[in-house]
Image (cartoon, rainbow, N blue to C red):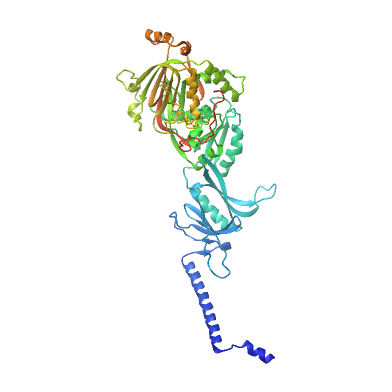
Amino acid sequence: MSEAMRESEQPACPRAQENNSKKKKKKRKTRQQKQSQHQKQQQVGVEEGPRGSVDPPQPDRTGTDPLLRGIFQIGKKSHDVVLTASRITWTPIEPDHPTGQSSVKKPQEDSVELKDVFAVKVKRRRSVGQTSGGTLLGITLFTCRPKGAKLKDHAVHLNNLSADHCEIWFKQLKEILNGFQSRPKSLKVFINPCSHKKEANQIYEDQVAPLFKLADIKTDVTITERKGHALSILKDCRLDEYDGVVCVGGDGSVAEVAHGLLLRAQMDAGRDTDSIFMPVQAALPLGVIPAGSTDAVACSVHGIRHPVTAALHIIMGHRQAVDVCSVSSMGRLLRFCFSVMFGFGSRTLAAAEKLTWIPNTQRREVAFITTLTNLKPEECELSFIPSSGGVVDQSDSESESELSDVGEGGPWQRRRGLFLNISIMSIPCLCSIAPRGLAPFTRLNNSSMALVAVGNASRSEFIKHLKRYSSTNNQFSFSFVETQCVYAVRLRPRSHSGWTDETSEENEESDSKNSPIISSEGTHPWNIDGELLEVPGELLIRVHSRILTLFGADVEEAEERPIKCSCI
């Protein structure tokens, strides 16, 4: 029996021995090929790092050549991660097939552009109360992703327990991120605690400050105590210590900070603000965190009232140059601003300022109804210089002699009559009440202002005009509404004595229902960026191309849910 077994273990024939010999030679050849491939990898300078990482020692920084390569766990799978100067790419590592056959389905590759990364942090697990140290888990990238008009922060976790490996990747990523020079490193922040629902400070602490800290941005925060507080600080502080200024508040707060930045620039440049002058550009960009009731400036540069979106525009260094108006009276500069209203808009604001016993959230509606009930056309002389549509050569056209020329032969066009409201805006003024903007036919930096002159009309027709701002219908298609793209506007309300006897006779013959009630006050209320200004005599409003930079981007329409005024 044993002899039979021994015989079965031997080859049945010489051919079987030959087949075994061929198999051994094939295995030996495969082993030699693998060794030669490994030697070639070492010759080109690729070394195997900890836990399977592969790091080229001296990469070519062309933007596409790999700087680093390694293995990280992303989610529940291991990934082959490659870093270049412009992006980081990761591909899942698929296990070998048991039969040795390669998978037909190619692993799905994912990537992030480094221009969309705003922070990189070492990821650790710490126990309760532990403030430093902890168990190393890997590194985390924080990216900025668009979602409609909003910007959202998103985290990508690269898990690897090797301290040396994570340190190499962390330093390389920090070096790349520090190369984005447009991103601010230090900011001066103004917070208006009384803005709208008094939520500005809470909005900043909960939604904005954590993002600034994550991006390693230093902040110097001032909570304003009174109107004009931010202006007084901007006149005297050292601006060279900051890379930008941030305002957390409504349109009135933004207007004050913008005026302060531009006024400081004129002071530093030695401009005489008591005469018609050519203003210089502001030294620092302005970031706007919406915390007001309308937030027209924030909507115009962000497309939406969203504090996180505004904060990420600031962090990423997105910048947008904008046109700004200057308002002068008797040759003296009063304000830099984005919008000016005279008539219904200014009367409504003046009425709201008197209703101090009513909460802020209801004050505007009460003032709106009161002013609409006592609707009064204003008699004034409106003069303007039409814009050519291109960039205006301000060095020639802003001379005092040209701007003072109101004769028939000059460039000014004149309208004299009764107006329910006159608006001048250098930006579209997008908001929830007017998603397409109060002035949809102008842009942020087209070197012109939008002039909307609403002539005398019945109350019902005027209400129809107002309602169309929140709809898709054209609010300017009425016969009593005139729109112009202008470079300069001069507005002179009617004085006590009136214009001429002929004008007075025309007023006496007008319909009693639409007859104007002319104000006999010495001053007239003006709505300048939501702030009330009492000024006697006429105003000169000019546009100045791109003298202020805002953190944000140009948008066509606000992605806000339209809100129809409950008053009408």
Left/right placement of residue 33 relative to residue 446 reads right
Q: In the rendered picture of this protein, how many numbered marks are placed on residues?
A: 0
Would you place residue 482 above or below residue 244 in this image? above
Would you say residue 343 is visible in this rendering? no
Residue 552 spot, x, y in % from top left: 48, 38
Let me know if residue 163 appears in the view. Answer: yes
| Quadrant of the rendered image containing residue 389 | top left
Q: Position of residue 349 (x, y in %)?
A: 53, 21
Residue depicted at x 50% and y 34%: 299
**Which image quadrant: the N terminus?**
bottom right
Q: Residue extending furthest left?
A: 409
**Image quadrant in which the C terminus is located:** top right
The image position of residue 393, as x and y in percent, is: 34, 31
Front-lying residue, 302 or 415:
415
- Pick whichever, 227 or 375, lies toward us: 375
Query: Residue 45's x, y, as percent?
Result: 48, 64
